[in-house]
Image (cartoon, rainbow, N blue to C red):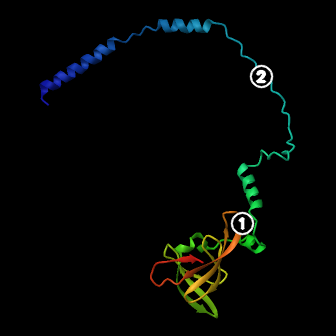
């Protein structure tokens, strides 16, 4: 940038500042007059606070027989009603297996997704070797559970594992059914129901 154009820019900037400075008025007499007028008005009265009504306690007497309790979530009521009607066909042992026991790791998988890859014997106890869909190997014995239908292992053989599942029919009844997992010799396949 040469000296001549620099001088022009500085001159233009200084002129703009002087012009803008000339537009400012220091006379605030109209503002002072308005402030005096507002302050001269008499102050108003503050409205009193509304009277506070005393608290009246109400004791809920409970739901009538034909109406549900409004303090109970509706989904729990429905669940309780389902539980009452869903016990058809359940033996006490089946009910215990469904409700009162801790779930085992292989119960998170569908039976068809599990593979039997072998067996082993240890101190007169037969073990089945199961491969889950994640590639993790599990050792199971008679009495363990696998699959999503409460599949209890009843027998372990060299070529398959027998299970007893508890399933609910479309009519809402619980029943036992047999299932099995065959030894996977091809690298595919899984459990099958009989």
Query: Residue sitting at 34 percent across and 11 percent down?
Result: 23
Query: Residue sitting at 70 percent across and 52 percent down?
Result: 75
- Name the mark on residue 50: 2
Residue 119, quarter of the rendered image:
bottom right
Q: Residue furthest bottom?
A: 124
First reached walking from the N terminus: tag 2 or tag 1: 2
Measured as percent of width and height from the top left, residue 162 is found at: 62, 82
- Name the mark on residue 45: none
Q: Mark 1: few, some, or many residues within 10 Å (few <14, many ≥20)?
A: some
Q: Residue furthest front?
A: 171
| In this rendering, position of residue 57 left or right of residue 117 | right
Residue 142, quarter of the rendered image:
bottom right
Q: Mark 2: few, some, or many residues within 10 Å (few <14, many ≥20)?
A: few
- Name the mark on residue 173: 1
In this view, the residue in front, 78 or 10, is 78
| In this rendering, position of residue 80 left or right of residue 181 | right
């Amino acid at each position: 940038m040469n000296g001549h154009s620099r001088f022009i820019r500085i001159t233009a900037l200084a002129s703009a500042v002087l012009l803008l400075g000339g537009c400012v008025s220091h006379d605030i007499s109209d503002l002072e007059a308005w402030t005096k007028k507002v302050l001269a008005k008499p102050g108003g009265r503050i409205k009193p606070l509304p009277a506070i009504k005393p608290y009246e306690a109400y004791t809920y007497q409970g739901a009538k027989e034909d109406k549900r309790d409004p303090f109970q979530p509706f989904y729990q009521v429905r669940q309780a009603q389902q539980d009452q009607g869903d016990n058809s066909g359940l033996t006490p042992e089946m009910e215990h297996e469904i409700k009162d026991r801790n779930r085992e790791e292989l119960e998170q998988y569908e039976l068809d997704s599990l593979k039997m890859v072998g067996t082993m014997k240890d101190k007169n106890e037969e073990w089945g070797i199961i491969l889950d869909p994640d590639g993790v190997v599990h050792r199971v014995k008679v009495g363990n559970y696998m699959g999503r239908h409460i599949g209890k292992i009843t027998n372990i053989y060299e070529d398959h594992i027998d299970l007893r599942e508890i399933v609910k029919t479309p009519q809402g009844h619980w029943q036992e059914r047999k299932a099995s997992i065959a030894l996977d010799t091809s690298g595919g396949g899984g459990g099958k129901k009989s």
